[in-house]
Image: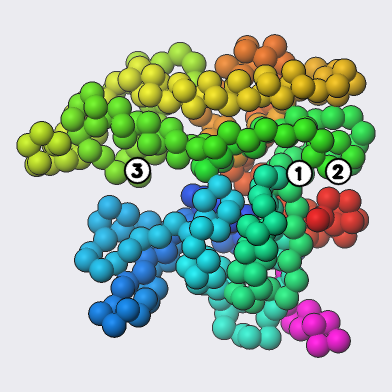
């Protein structure tokens, strides 16, 4: 009864807890918050830990944090790796939207990776409830991505969705509102960023931060034909220990990230080869739908289409597909009965 009364005061949320960014969808209003999933924690002299920055402000401290300040990324591949910090981060988001009114106890829809263990799912649910949620509805992340892409997930025909996130790539075939076949490629966009960092360290003896690596990937990266562009990368010279700049060519970046592209393509082909004839026919007709921020890598859709022989469709605003789909589950009660878990 008390929970029902609290529901009268709450505004229900869908939350996509991503490795790089966390997005919040408010019932009736749409996307209301998008914050980097980063928290800066100061370690006191008596062992006390205090949150000093969250989101964009904390992200600016990556590689620049003062002494005794630790910059933490509590969620990796949709899984909580630091429960205490994750709760502080979620509580910050809730207060940003609802203020400090303790009567606000929203219901929440959370997309979770298909491969998440029961312990990881329980940790995510407990963190949400500790931050203020009164009820947590789970939905498989590929299903949320498909809904956000406008796919009818309840249809009997199979549909393949490739969700390229920062922490991992989830490849799923969906039918009757369920994931019927699945593959996961760990690493995602972060693995490509790390490959760029390693390339500059080995080939140019230059150490750069991950934010610069992300920028280089966005500007010069390609899954297919290398661009003719060059940009300047600034970092620390590993030989002399002083700040230095180096020219980075697009073809160098393409070589660095190509193993990550190959891994996704091979996983898609492996999943296709395991499908029964009926579903294989469905995918041939309906093609592959790309979601996730990393799907915007230059020419990735063309490369995947060429190497699978299937039509590949890009989703508008692919980085928002998962939270948009979770918002649909939040707002459409009938969907909760089919895809909720």
C-alpha span from label 1 to label 2: 7 Å
Q: Please provide the residue range marked out in magenta.
A: 1-12
Q: Residue at x 68, y 86 (%)?
A: 103
Residue positioned 79% across, 39% down in the render: 179
Q: Which residue is mark 1?
A: 143
Q: Position of residue 52 (x, y in %)?
A: 36, 72
Q: Is residue 256 left or right of residue 92?
A: left
Q: Within 10 Å of the Cα at label 2, are there few (<14), some (14-19), or many (20+) other Cα atoms?
A: some
What is the C-alpha distance between the residues marked 3 and 1?
30 Å
> Which percent across, then down, holds residue 228?
35, 16
Choose the circle earlier in sequence order: 2 or 3: 2
Tell whether 9 sits left or right of 19. right
Of helix, strand and loop, which one carries label 2? Answer: loop
The crowd level at tag 1 (other Cα within 10 Å; few <14, some 14-19, many 20+) is: many
Mainly helix, strand or loop, the magenta region?
helix
Residue bearing the label numbered 2: 177
């Amino acid at each position: 009864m008390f929970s029902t009364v609290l529901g009268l005061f709450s505004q229900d949320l869908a939350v996509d807890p991503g490795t790089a960014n966390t997005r919040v969808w408010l019932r009736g209003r749409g996307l209301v918050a998008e914050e980097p999933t980063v928290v800066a924690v100061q370690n006191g002299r008596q062992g006390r830990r205090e949150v000093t920055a969250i989101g964009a402000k904390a992200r600016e401290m990556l590689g620049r944090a003062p002494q005794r300040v630790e910059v933490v990324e509590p969620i990796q591949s949709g899984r909580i790796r630091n429960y205490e910090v994750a709760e502080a981060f979620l509580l910050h988001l809730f207060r940003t939207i609802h203020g400090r009114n303790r009567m606000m106890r929203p219901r929440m829809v959370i997309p979770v990776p298909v491969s998440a263990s029961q312990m990881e799912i329980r940790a995510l649910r407990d963190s949400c409830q500790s931050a203020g949620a009164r009820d947590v509805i789970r939905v498989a992340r590929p299903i949320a991505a498909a809904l956000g892409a406008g796919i009818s997930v309840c249809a009997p025909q199979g549909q393949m969705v490739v969700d390229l996130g920062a922490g991992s790539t989830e490849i799923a075939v969906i039918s009757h509102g369920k994931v019927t076949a699945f593959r996961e490629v760990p690493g995602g966009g972060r693995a490509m960023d790390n490959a760029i960092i390693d390339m500059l360290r080995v080939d140019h003896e230059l150490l750069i931060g991950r934010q610069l690596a992300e920028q280089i990937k966005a500007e010069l990266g390609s899954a297919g034909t290398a661009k003719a562009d060059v940009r300047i990368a600034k970092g620390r010279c590993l030989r002399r220990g002083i700040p230095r700049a180096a020219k980075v060519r697009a073809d160098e970046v393409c070589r660095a990230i190509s193993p990550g592209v190959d891994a996704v393509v091979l996983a898609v082909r492996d999943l296709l080869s395991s499908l029964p004839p009926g579903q294989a026919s469905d995918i041939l007709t309906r093609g592959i739908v790309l979601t996730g921020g990393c799907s915007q890598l230059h020419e990735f859709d063309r490369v995947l289409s060429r190497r699978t022989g299937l039509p590949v469709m890009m989703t508008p605003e692919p980085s928002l597909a998962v939270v948009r789909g979770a918002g649909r589950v939040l707002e459409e009660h009938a969907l909760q009965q089919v895809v909720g878990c």
